Image (cartoon, grey):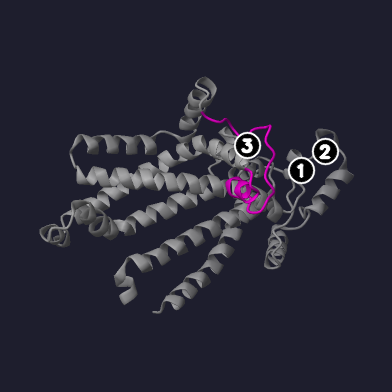
Amino acid sequence: MTFFRYIARRVLFTIPILLGITLVSFLIANAVPADPINVNLPQSQLNNPEIVAAFRAEWGLDKSPLDQYLTYLGNLVQGNLGRSIKTRQLVADDIARFLPATIELATNATVLGILLGVGLGVASAVWRNHWIDFLARTMAVIGVSVPVFVLALVFLSVFHAQLGIAAGPGRLDFTMDEPAMVTGLFTIDSLAAGRMDIFINAVAHLVLPSIVLALYVAGLISRVTRSAMLEVLGMDYMRTARAKGVREIIVIMRHGLSNAMIPILTVIGLSYGNLLAGAVLTESIFAWPGIGRYMFRASTSQDFPAIMGVSLLIALIYVVVNLVVDLLYYFVDPRLRAN
C-alpha cells in the first residue's frame, strides 16, 4: 500500500465517523429532560404563548426530531453549523473565536508535558529501582491521580494570590489590549504586531494553566515511556551498540528511545486530543476563554446548535490527531513502510 493510498483510506473513514457523531450528539441532546425555552426565555415571557411559539419556530423546535436532524445535516453539507441560541452568533464564528485559546493552551501544555514526561520516563527506566526511579514514579502518580481542578486551585492560590509570582486568570491583564487577530494565538499575534509587552504578558498568563495540564500529561507519558524503555533496554541491538563503544547517551536516545516511540506517540496523541477537546475545569478556574468553557455554557443553556457544533469539532479533532499519529507511525516504524 502506497503512502498516499494509506492517507486516502484513512480520510474516507472519517466521513461515516463524523456522521455517526452528529447522530449520537443529536440523540443525547434531545434525550436530556430539559426544555431550552425554560432556560433561554425570561420568566416574564414564559406565560406568553405567542412568544413561546415564535421561539420554537425560530429554532425549529416545532418540528419533529427527524426533521430537525435532517435540516441540520442539510445545513452541515453547506458548511453551516447553525446559530447559537445563547450568543445569537453563528456557531462557526463562536468556535473560531474560542478555539485558538484552547489550541494555545493545549499546545504549550503538551510540549511541556512531553519534555517532562519523556525525561522522567527515560531516567526512571535507565536508573531502575534507584531513588531517581522512585522519584519519577511518584511524580507520575501525583500527576495522574490528583484531580486537575485541585492542582489548578492550589497553584492559583499559592503562586498568584499568596506569593504573587505568577499571573492570574485570563489570557491577558485587564489593562492590556488584545493584539490584532491573525491566528487567534496571543503569543503569535503579539509578535506579528511587534508588541513585546503583550507577548510577555500572554506568556505569563500561560504559565500556571500550562503547568497544571502538563503535570497530568507528563504523568501519562512518563509511565508509558518507562514501560517502553524497559522493553528495549535489554534488546540485543542495545548490547551490540555498547559493545561497539557507542556512547551511552547515544545508545539510550538513538537506539533505545527511537525504538520505543510507538506507544509514546500514541499517548501523546491521545493527550493532545483530550486537551484540544476542552479542559473544562482548568479553563473555568483560570477564566480561560476556550472551547471547553464555551461547551459548558452551551450545555447548561441547552444550546443545541452549539452542542452539536462543538461535538462535531471534538470528533474532528480526534480523527485528525489519530491520523497524524498514524502518519508518524509510518515514518517511525520501518516495518510499515516495508509493507
- Residue type, numbered disc 1: Ile
Q: Earlier in the sequence, mark 1 or mark 2?
A: 1
Q: Residue at x 37, y 56 (%)?
A: 265
Q: State how far apart marks 1 and 2 are (Cα).
A: 8 Å
Q: Secondary structure at mark 1?
A: helix
Mark 3 or 2 closer to N-term? 2
Q: Quick check: is 278 in the magenta stretch?
A: no
Range drawn in magenta = 166-195
Question: Which mark is in front, 1 or 3?
Answer: 3
- Mark 1 nearby-residue class (10 Å; few <14, some 14–19, many ≥20): some
The residue under label 2 is which amino acid type? Leu
Res. 177 image quadrant: top right
Q: Is residue 276 left or right of residue 262?
A: right
Disc number at residue 37? 1
Q: Amino acid at mark 3?
A: Leu
**Magenta-highlighted stretch: main secondary structure?**
loop
Residue position marked by numbered label 2 in the rendering: 46
Q: Are marks 1 and 2 in contact (CB under 8 Å)?
A: yes
N-term-proximal mark, 1 vs 3? 1
Using the image, tell me which numbered label, if any, was put on residue 172: 3
Q: Residue at x 43, y 53 (%)?
A: 270
Q: Which percent across, then down, holds residue 295?
A: 62, 45
In the rendered view, does 273 fall on the left or right side of 36?
left
Q: Secondary structure at mark 3?
A: loop
| Above or below for 185 versus 2 | above
Report if residue 291 is visible in the image. no
Task: Give the Cα distance between marks 3 and 2.
Answer: 39 Å
The spot of residue 271 in percent (x, y) is 44, 49
